[in-house]
Amino acid sequence: MVAVVIMAVGLLALLRVAIMSIDTNMTNSLRDEAVRIAEEQISTLRQTKYDNLTGQSNWPTTPTPITRKLRSADRTFYVATWVRDLDATPSAKIVSVAVGWDYKGSGSVGPTKRQYVHMASSVISRPPGT
């Protein structure tokens, strides 16, 4: 009887470790996808003609939702971008992208709700001779 109790406690501990590793793995997968989304957005902004990069911003009022399939489920990421001049330098701008997502308890309030944000920025200079 004691052996059964000891074995049950050991199996519960192993179950907890398995659940924690799955949770950590999913968190990492979501973060990796957010990094990919931010890189795509920065790349798009870098390909935009310099003069078209104005003080655009949709942060934090209206982030754009982007849905990606991750592990056979649709996951929604919220993307916000903004562009501003680099100090008083008229020949350089900073473009920034924030990608946010929820994990565990999405839509709920309280200690189980986990919100994450990945931010990426880049400086874009005016091409020479323009």
Image (spheres, rainbow, N blue to C red):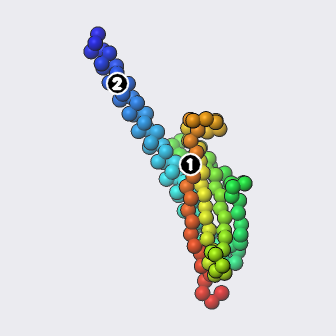
Which amino acid is tagged 2?
Leu
In the picture of the structure, the residue carrying the numbered disc 2 is 11
**Residue at the (62%, 47%) spot, across then down:** 76
Furthest toward the bottom, the residue is 129
For the residue pair 30 and 114, the one nearer the viewer reads as 114
**Residue at the (34%, 21%) spot, across then down:** 9
Q: Residues within 10 Å of mark 2 (few under 14, many from 20)?
A: few
Quadrant location, the C terminus: bottom right
Above or below for 26 versus 60: above
Quadrant location, the N terminus: top left
**Residue at the (47%, 48%) spot, across then down:** 28
In the picture of the structure, the residue carrying the numbered disc 1 is 116
| Residue 111 at x, y percent in the picture | 57, 35
Furthest toward the top, the residue is 1
Task: Point out the tag, 2 or 1, that comes first from the N-terminus.
Answer: 2
Residue 20 is at least partly visible in this image: yes
